[in-house]
Image: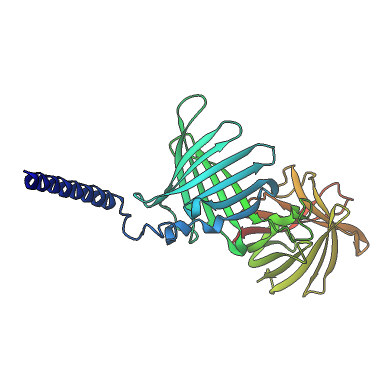
Amino acid sequence: MLRATCFALRFIWLAVLALLACLFGCGAARATPPAGFSSATSCETSEYHRLDFWLGEWNVTSAGKLDGTNVVAKVLGGCAIEERWSDADGSSGKSLFTFDRALGKWKQTWATSVGTWKEKREIEIDFDGTPGTVRFLGEVPRPGGGTALDRTTLTPLAGGRVLQVIERSTDGGATWERWEGLYVKTNTSMACSDAAHRAFDFWLGDWDLVVKVRKPGEPEAWDEAHGVNEIRATHGGCVIEERFRAEGPGEPWAGHSVSVLVDGRWRQTWVDDQASYMLFVGGFEAESGSDGENGKNGKKMILEGEPKERDGKHFRMRMVFTDVTATSMLWRWERTDDEGKTWRPRMLITYRRR
């Protein structure tokens, strides 16, 4: 009797062990990460580093003005990314980015201090974009009913900068409203890191240029050539340096300028290989009307030159930075012969960010 009882107990114990083994084995099988991931290093694979170019502390400008600051950092042991936005108007927002292993895509959940929210998912890039570009798309409810498409595109740029484009469509993607933000990392070690010194940062970067100059004797006709411009913040961020080269019009030419902020106004010195030496002073101000291209009023960066005299005539030149976005702008070289009552464009340079 005792022997039979022991046998029965042994059988029951073996059955329990087998059941436990099955349960733990099946559980382990269900928890096995997809191919390419291990349980120990699942957040160290390349997929978890795809947004690393966006990590950091940033000043974000749009159309040359500071829109806000952003702090983007890894959290949860590198398995997620948190975004902390502070808007220039005093509001704030946060995002949590997580990687969906089943889909192989990143997801974003966004909320703000004024109650708005968005959910987006990474989608395939349907254009020949810059390598490393990441795009998110979501459908969000509209206050008046219905939904809108909302998408964000993040593009790494030269010099460690990032371009963020946020677009919204209420007609199924036929047309999009667009906002562009240029991310430049803050540097607390810079001697000139305040907002006033950073007002010229919209010009920083590497640019491809189209240079148009009025033809002599033909006031409505233009000669055209291509060029490049490289703009850097140097000397602790206190100096903006320009290195300009153009194929023409006419013979190739090149120049160099340095700009510094003095008593709240920007002062620029320009020299070139045509023996030119020019001084300018100015800043953001309301632009007076112009009889040339793109002469609409607005707050533009205007640097005005010293009065000059040639052949008994007094005149003055100025440069105007206008139509500024994160990826493009128009630079106008203008002349006045009537003490600034009217300005006429003599040279137009279209900037396109590389």
Horizontal and vertical percent position of residue 319: 78, 56
Horizontal and vertical percent position of residue 59: 67, 51
Q: Residue 6 vs residue 208: left or right?
A: left
Which residue is most to the front?
Answer: 2
Q: Which sits in the foreground, 197 or 128?
A: 197
Q: Residue 269 is drawn in which quadrant? A: bottom right
Q: Write the residue at 20% across / 49% down.
A: 17
Quadrant for the C terminus in the image? bottom right
Horizontal and vertical percent position of residue 258: 79, 65
Q: Write the residue at 54% across / 44% down.
A: 166
How many numbered discs sit on the rendered protein?
Answer: 0
Q: Residue 34 vs residue 123: left or right?
A: left
Q: Residue 12 is drawn in which quadrant? A: top left
In the displayed structure, would residue 285 be above or below residue 191? above
Q: Write the residue at 43% across / 36% down.
A: 172
Q: Which sits in the foreground, 99 or 339?
A: 99
Which residue is most to the top?
Answer: 144
In the displayed structure, would residue 35 be above or below residue 23? below
Quadrant for the N terminus in the image? top left
Q: Which sits in the foreground, 196 or 43?
A: 43
Q: Residue 96 vs residue 331: left or right?
A: left
Q: Residue 288 is drawn in which quadrant? A: top right
Q: Which sits in the foreground, 107 or 196?
A: 107
Q: What colouring does the structure picture have?
A: rainbow
Horizontal and vertical percent position of residue 331: 71, 56
Q: Residue 40 vs residue 318: left or right?
A: left
